[in-house]
Image: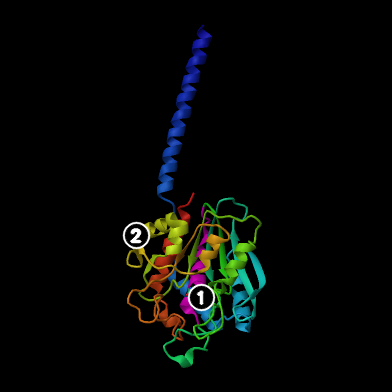
Amino acid sequence: MKQYMILGFTACLLLAVTSCKTGNNSKAKDTAEQHVIVPEFNADSAYNYIQAQVDFGPRVPNTQVHVKCGEYLANKLEEYGAKVTNQYADLLAFNGTILKARNIIGSYNPEHKKRILLFAHWDTRPWSDNDPDKKNHHTPVLGANDGASGAGVLLEVARLINQQAPALGIDIIFFDAEDYGAPQFYNGNHKEEYWCLGAQYWARNPHVAGYNARFGILLDMVGGKNATFYRECYSEEYARSINKKIWRKAEELGYSAFFIDERGSMITDDHLFVNRIARIPSIDIIPNIVGAKHSSFGDFWHTVNDDMGEIDKNTLKAVGQTVLAVIYNEK
Ligand code: AHN
Ligand code: ZN
């Protein structure tokens, strides 16, 4: 009897200790969840990655400059500890041209089942066909904002992930041949599907069989002066909760002047094909400039003025820091 009493007492004590321990643990976990350490996005660093791409010249597919810049981007991802996969493909453009395309994929923690996909296009447009001056229409776009900005911000994200890993696996994809859609001066038949050729190729042929991610974020033209980002409408259709997460985080961080929590327009962009073909809920951070004269993306768009003068470090910081905060807060 006495033995049983001692046994019972010990069991209670053990239970008390165990439950007490659990209590402490979950409290510690709660606190940890509230105070995830998010790295500081360095806008000077992102700016330099943009400058480096622009310094090559226009990154138009089937040119030497394009090949060289592709090497630069892949090497940087590798330098920052990503497992790099190059996807080479011959893609058919609207006019019958075969584009020697290269999607560049950098994976962090590739074995992890829970993943986030971050992407941007890295090619630039062969024509400044939205330039107010017709004589510029056949000049390639330099693409400081339209091309280099997204890749520049993501290279900075890569540098930071290499220093401190987030809880989830991350894939950074630089898509090629986004900006080879038929120019405004083209009179032949063409379809919307001639934009975003690299993303379409990857969505049909992911670098890992059966690839999936919790969500995707596309960064397109994220470096402009006085940029405002509205919730893009395909993103709302396919991934409203991700839009919500990002715009809420931006507000929390004090970036409401950049991230306007209202619906914008519907843009055919790389994320549309990642949503429709790869079925990964993905959103597009893309400018919507109210009152711009020549384009809702801003008056630099597809003109000879898309140069470093268009880039503002404050915009890079707002976008980069928001994206970082979102990915480091995923569990
Ligand atoms: C269209 O204009 C149909 N889509 C915009 C996609 C784009 C072009 N992003 C950058 N350049
Ligand atoms: Zn473009």
Residue 29 on image: x %, y %: 45, 42
User: Colour mode?
Assistant: rainbow
Query: Taking the image as drawn, is residue 82 in sight?
Result: no
Of 134 and 3, which appears nearest the observer?
134
Disc 2 residue type?
Glu
Residue 226 on image: x %, y %: 35, 74
> With respect to residue 15, does 144 lie above or below?
below
Occupied quadrant, residue 53: bottom right
Disc 1 residue type?
Gly
Stretch of the chain drawn in magenta? 142-166
Q: Which residue is mark 1?
A: 147
Q: Is residue 230 left or right of residue 109?
A: left
Query: Farthest bottom residue?
Result: 135
Of 25 and 60, which appears nearest the observer?
60
Kindly identify the residue that appears in the image at 55 percent across and 64 percent down.
273
Label 2 – label 1 distance at C-alpha = 26 Å
Residue 172 on image: x %, y %: 56, 64
Residue labelled 1 has its Cβ within 8 Å of some atom of ligand 2: yes
The secondary structure that dominates the magenta segment is helix
Tell which circle, 2 or 1, labels the residue nearer the N-terminal end: 1
Kindly identify the residue that appears in the image at 52 percent across and 71 percent down.
151
Q: Which mark is residue 251?
A: 2
Identify the secondary structure beneath mark 1. helix
Query: Taking the image as drawn, is residue 171 in sight?
Result: yes
Question: Is 80 part of what is drawn in magenta?
Answer: no
Residue 32 on image: x %, y %: 43, 46
Occupied quadrant, residue 124: bottom right
> With respect to residue 283, does 140 lie above or below?
below
